Amino acid sequence: MEENKKELFDIDTSVMYILGISEALFDFQLLVQIKACFERKQYSVAIVTDMEMKEEKEDIYSVYDYFSPELSSENLIKANHYIKEIELNKEYDLFLVGMKEGSVSFGREIPEDLGLSVYGISRILHPDCVLLQVFWGRLSGDRFT
């Protein structure tokens, strides 16, 4: 792969975003369960997340270092190149993208980083589809904090 420092690479592997409408809905275990579901159907699946990973795990890739301490176009390009390297070296059918910092607020409270992480990742890893987690059933006000 010839690297151009200012160019974004196309990611040819299918990409599915798993997003919540509240930070209370982000659940890493849900990503793992969705991954397992696809693998039972014989798909090869990797998870891409903005969570800080203490140790490397098979088929789970963190872009945390590219998003922290702050998001920049330079770091987004590096993250894109990192994901392209993964794509070239492994044969995945699907990237599941779960962004911990990617929630949306209903009120005036400012969630995490104002959605900049989701905007940033969407610029470098275009989704083919989105699985949106929504509230279901009766919820009390204390569930939103």
Image: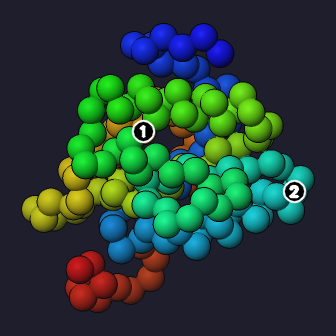
Q: Which mark is on residue 18?
A: none
Q: Position of residue 8 (x, y in %)?
A: 48, 18
Mark 1 is on which residue type? Answer: Ile
Residue at 65 percent across and 67 percent down: it is 32
Which residue is situated farthest in the right direction here? 42
> Residue 136: x percent and y percent?
46, 76
Q: Which is nearer the eye, 81 or 109? A: 81
Q: Read off the residue under disc 2.
A: 41
Q: Alpha-carbon neighbours of circle 2 within 10 Å: few (<14), some, or many (≥20)? A: few
Work out whether 37 lies above or below 13. Answer: below
- What is the crowding at mark 1: few (fewer than 14 residues within 10 Å), some, or many (at least 20)? many
The residue shown at (10%, 62%) is: 108
Q: Secondary structure at mark 2?
A: loop
Q: Is residue 86 visible?
A: yes
Determine the residue positioned at 51% across, 51% down: 62
Using the image as rendered, state which of residue 21 and residue 26 is in the foreground: 26
Q: Quadrant of residue 87?
A: top right
Q: Which mark is residue 121?
A: 1
Please, which residue is most extreme toward the left here? Answer: 108
Spot occupied by residue 59 in the image (x, y as percentages of width and height): 69, 54
SS under mark 1: helix
Task: Determine whether, in the image, residue 24 is placed left or right of residue 40.
Answer: left
Which amino acid type corresponds to the residue marked 2 in the rendered image? Lys
Q: Please name whichever residue, 32 or 103, is drawn nearer the observer in this view of the structure.
A: 32
Residue placed at 36% from the left, 54% from the top?
102
Q: Is residue 49 left or right of residue 43?
A: left
Q: Is residue 65 above or below residue 120?
A: below
Horizontal side of residue 118 vs 109, given as left or right: right
Viewed as shown, does residue 61 lie left or right of 40? left
